Amino acid sequence: MTDIAAESATAAASGAAATEQFRSKQKSRTTDVDTQRVHTLVTELLNATHDIVRRHKVTYAEYDALKSWLIQVGEDGEWPLFLDVWVEHVVEEVAGETREGSKGTIEGPYYVPDAPALPAEATLPMSEEEAGTPLLFQGQVADVDGSPLPAAKVEIWQADDAGYYSQFAPGLPEWNLRGTVFANETGHFKIHTIQPAPYRIPTDGACGELIEAAGWHPWRPAHLHLKVSAPGHQLITTQLYFQGGQYVDNDIASAVKPELILHPTPTGNGNDQEVRYDFVLDKA
Ligand code: DHB
Ligand code: FE
């Protein structure tokens, strides 16, 4: 991932960084796979595929196009991107079914753990001349029974005003627009940042080729990514979107929920905007 800054913003470069990031996260986990479960899930996946082939009379030309496309997704390192855009939202829906607190949504491929620790009121790391509308994002973290969670941790990461994530696009400072904010004794936090731009998934790789071939668009609405946690509580991974923003109604990754739309208002200082959003965490 460290060489990314020297490269250009290509699907293969961001794909390689996302793949490496996923692998390092996965290394620290044990994957217990139950034989019966693998049998059931893979059989049903294959059966669904066979059914599509029969119903649509898929031709050899189409089968070979699929085969060469799948090979290319791997070569471009775009499996994290593909899965997080087109599959993760349903996995998250199932995972979040029994939660009472704040809504979650997909993590996506660009989370990096251990971003710089920041106090309850802080400005995210950004360059001196960072472009974009200043945004004050504040709120409180509480338990489902309403008690504030003083030891809450708010991890935030976002794209910049050009739609790029640090560590996955060239030329950005390592921790640009990433931070780990520790709430104060009443669970409050106050984060000074800028409004992110909509995110365009890379169009020069295999996923871009699919999007074009299917006549889709490659965009996600502008969003803030968050992981909010506190001792004794369930961590929530979520995203927040902006009222009236482009693509809020047609996110390529299907990750928008009505509860996750922010309504920022002007602070009265130039273009600056501010918004409050409170998080509610379920008990662990
Ligand atoms: C992808 C990128 C994102 O920024 C995101 O939030 C979700 C998915 C992607 O490229 O797969
Ligand atoms: Fe994102």
Image: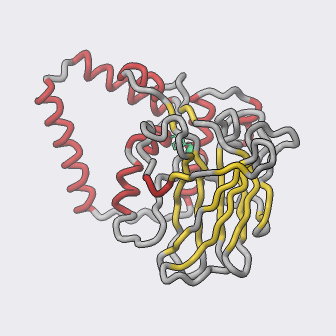
**Which of the pair 118/57 is nearer the observer?**
118
Q: Residue at x 77, y 34 (%)?
A: 171
Q: Residue at x 58, y 67 (%)?
A: 278
> In the rendered image, is residue 194 in sight?
yes
**In the rendering, at what x and y percent does residue 2 appear?**
73, 42
Q: In the shown orientation, is residue 74 left or right of residue 51? A: right
**In the rendering, at what x and y percent does residue 67 appear?**
33, 26
**Image quadrant assignment for residue 229:** bottom right
Tell me if residue 21 comes above or below residue 101 in the rendering: above
**Which of the pair 193/203 is nearer the observer?**
193
> In the rendered image, is residue 109 in sight?
no
Q: Residue at x 56, y 63 (%)?
A: 28
Q: Quadrant of ligand 2?
A: top right
**In the rendering, at what x and y percent does residue 284 appear?**
48, 79
Residue farthest front in this picture: 268
**In the rendering, at what x and y percent does residue 260 appear?**
50, 55
Coloring applied to the structure: secondary structure
Residue farthest top in this picture: 61
Tell me if residue 24 comes above or below residue 154 in the rendering: above
Tell me if residue 250 comes above or below residue 42 in the rendering: above
Q: Quadrant of the N terminus?
A: top right
Residue farthest right in this picture: 128
**Image quadrant assignment for residue 40:** bottom left
**Image quadrant assignment for residue 155:** bottom right
Q: In the shown orientation, is residue 42 left or right of residue 131? A: left
Q: Residue at x 23, y 45 (%)?
A: 45
Instruction: State the count of labels.
Output: 0
